[in-house]
Image (tube, rainbow, N blue to C red):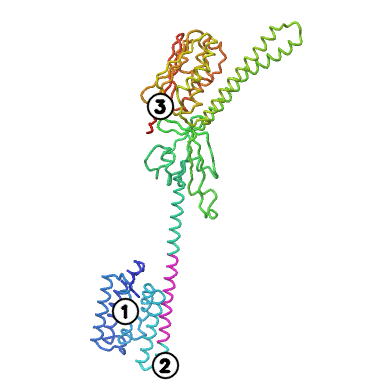
């Protein structure tokens, strides 16, 4: 029945063992006083029995203290021995009304600690039986019965009160442990969530000293050093749009609600990041009892918006430039058509004048159409439309391009030649992007070449295929080569201005090349032509047997 391990709190067990060690020594001293008639000796049986019992009791207490019990059987044995020795001490040494009888409450507590309510009932029963036996041994007169009864009630009251207090403390302790475990669980959950956020999250105390931070904070700050204990102003150095330093801790102390700012920059070892910062005061749940301006700390969230801000500014600039570029041809076309309408009502204007006006308006519409096509291609590339790679037979793609653009070259009395390796094989890429990229180079070559030839050269190298479009046109100056891939850039060369280019072609080409995972190389010399080239990896194909 009592074979299992005990579950008593270690500190409680130590208190019980210590009390059990010193109690026999006190009772021994009290018994000696009775032996020498200093106190009432009416219950004292004999010197031999007294010293033998106390020797056994002291040895038992010492053994219990030196070798703590680890199993219920051992604890039951010690409790039975202590109850038996305590009862015998009351009956044959001190009497039931001795001042040490209330010490029985210690046995109550020990019995309850090891065996709960069962142990408590047994201990109380032994006390009552002892009181009853004492009455019988002393003759059973009324005053003794009343005295023993009152003493029993008093001891039981003391013991039960002590047990009740211990039980309440035990319940409170269990609830405290449960509360701490729940708090730890909630804290771990919150930390797990915070550490998985992409934004940097930091928490400071009321003085601005960092106490909690997540992994994204270390990534943003590009460090592996602990941030705990560092002041927020030493870690995060912010500047406003005028490049004026921001004292973040002062701003934190001034805030009373959530503040969001996206007009700040963050300096980090020579690099400047655009950041969005959100900060707010932290107040405890008992804030009602505190002053409204008291804060328990601050929570700070930082987000790197450098890319999004750059894209936003680039978008705004792009819209502005597109609007400007569209306004000119639309104005020309609108004005020309309006003039033609007026001239048609006046007979003095001949057919040639009207025809010239219509041609001018038509050229502007063609220009607008080219710009819309370029913008459409750029939009597809930006959004990743039709970017799924597929197996492309290079020779078939080149033949399609030749058939499509050879008539245009012939119309300008240019030679469109192919220079192809024998076995070109296959590549895995977006067919649409690759075709539009080559079309861009070929149409530019035809547009800016007045005489000579255009050569589309495709050669197979180790692990890749190289595409080159060479022309004998006007060429590109060194100064223009650095800017030629910028959007809406057109050379100041008058020969370039003679053609109706939008300034988007090579910008779109660079975007398409990036989507294909390659880069356009340009080799050009003014008045000697240009060569645009790029390479793509070949598709690995295994022969099936």
Q: Which residues are magenta?
A: 148-173
- Callout 3 crowding tier (Cα within 10 Å): few <14, some 14–19, many ≥20: many
**Which element is circle 3 on?**
loop
Where is the C terminus found, in terms of image quarters?
Answer: top left
Q: Which quadrant holds residue 216? A: top left
Foreground mark, 1 or 2? 1
Percent of width and height locating residue 39: 31, 86
For label 2, the residue is: 142
Q: Earlier along the polypeptide chain: callout 1 or callout 2?
A: 1
Q: Position of residue 98 (x, y in %)?
A: 35, 84
The residue closer to the viewer here, 322 or 24, is 322
Which residue is label 1 attached to? Answer: 82
Q: Residue at position x 65%, y 12% from top?
A: 359
Residue that carries the numbered disc 3 in the rendered image: 538
**In 3D space, how far apart are the residues under numbered discs 1 and 3 (Cα atoms)?**
92 Å
Q: Earlier in the sequence, mark 2 or mark 3?
A: 2
Q: Position of residue 179 (x, y in %)?
A: 45, 60
By secondary structure, the bulk of the magenta-drawn segment is best described as helix
Q: What distance separates the C-alpha of mark 2 from that of mark 3?
A: 116 Å
- Please state if 334 lies on the left or on the right of 55 as rendered: right
Q: For mark 2, does the 10 Å Cα neighbourhood hold few (<14), some (14 to 19), or many (20 or more) residues?
A: few
Q: Is residue 396 above or below residue 448?
A: below
Say which quadrant the N terminus sits in.
bottom left
| Residue at the image point whose x is 71% and y is 15% from the top | 338
- The answer to which image quadrant residue 342 occupies is top right
Question: In the drawing, what numbered circle is on residue 321?
Answer: none
**Closer to the observer: label 2 or label 3?**
3
Q: Is residue 404 above or below residue 315?
A: above
Where 307 falls versus 101 (above or below)?
above
Q: Residues within 10 Å of mark 1 (few under 14, many from 20)?
A: some
231 relative to 456, above or below: below
Between residue 164 and residue 193, name the one nearer to us: 193
């Amino acid at each position: 029945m009592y074979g299992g391990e005990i579950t008593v709190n270690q500190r409680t067990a130590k208190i019980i063992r210590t009390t059990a060690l010193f109690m026999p020594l006190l009772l021994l001293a009290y018994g000696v006083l009775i032996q020498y008639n200093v106190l009432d000796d009416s219950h004292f049986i004999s010197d031999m029995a007294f010293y033998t019992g106390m020797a056994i009791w002291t040895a038992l207490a010492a053994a219990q203290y030196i070798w703590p019990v680890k199993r219920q059987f051992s604890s039951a044995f010690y409790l039975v021995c202590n109850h038996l020795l305590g009862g015998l001490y009351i009956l044959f040494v001190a009497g039931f009304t001795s001042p040490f009888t209330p010490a029985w409450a210690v046995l109550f507590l020990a019995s309850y600690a090891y065996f709960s309510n069962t142990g408590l009932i047994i201990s109380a029963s032994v006390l009552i039986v002892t009181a009853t036996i004492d009455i019988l041994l002393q003759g059973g007169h009324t005053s003794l019965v009343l005295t023993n009864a009152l003493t029993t009630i008093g001891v039981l009251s003391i013991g039960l009160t002590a047990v009740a207090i211990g039980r309440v403390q035990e319940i409170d302790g269990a609830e405290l442990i449960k509360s701490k475990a729940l708090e730890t669980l909630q804290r771990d959950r919150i930390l797990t969530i915070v550490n998985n956020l992409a934004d940097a999250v930091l928490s400071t105390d009321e003085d601005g000293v960092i106490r909690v931070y997540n992994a994204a904070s270390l990534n943003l700050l590009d460090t592996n050093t602990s941030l705990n204990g560092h002041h927020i102003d030493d870690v995060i150095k912010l500047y406003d749009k005028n490049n004026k330093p921001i004292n973040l801790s002062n701003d934190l102390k001034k805030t009373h609600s959530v503040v969001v700012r996206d007009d700040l920059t963050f300096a980090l070892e020579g690099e400047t990041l655009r950041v969005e910062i959100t900060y707010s005061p932290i107040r405890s749940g008992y804030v009602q009892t505190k002053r409204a301006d008291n804060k328990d700390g601050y929570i700070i969230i930082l987000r790197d918006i450098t890319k999004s801000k750059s894209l936003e500014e680039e978008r705004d600039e792009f819209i502005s430039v597109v609007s400007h570029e569209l306004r000119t041809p639309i104005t020309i076309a609108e004005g020309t058509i309006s003039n033609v309408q007026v001239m048609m009502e006046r007979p003095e204007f001949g057919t040639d004048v009207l025809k010239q006006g219509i041609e001018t308006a038509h050229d502007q519409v063609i220009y607008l159409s080219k710009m819309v096509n370029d913008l459409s291609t750029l939009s597809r590339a930006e959004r990743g439309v039709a970017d799924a790679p597929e197996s492309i037979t290079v020779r078939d793609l080149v033949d399609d391009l030749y058939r499509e653009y050879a008539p245009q070259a012939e119309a300008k009395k240019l030679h469109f030649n192919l220079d192809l390796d024998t076995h070109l094989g296959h590549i895995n890429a977006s067919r649409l992007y690759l075709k539009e990229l080559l079309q861009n180079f070929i149409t530019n070559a035809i547009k800016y070449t007045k005489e000579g030839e255009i050569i589309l050269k495709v050669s197979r190298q180790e692990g890749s295929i190289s595409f080159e479009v060479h022309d004998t046109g006007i060429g590109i100056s060194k100064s223009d080569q650095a800017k030629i891939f910028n959007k809406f850039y057109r050379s100041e060369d008058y020969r370039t201005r003679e053609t109706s280019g939008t300034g988007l072609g090579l910008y779109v080409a660079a975007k398409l090349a990036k989507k294909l995972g390659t880069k356009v190389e340009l080799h050009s010399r003014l008045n000697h032509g240009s060569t645009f080239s790029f390479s793509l990896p070949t598709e690995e194909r295994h022969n099936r047997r």
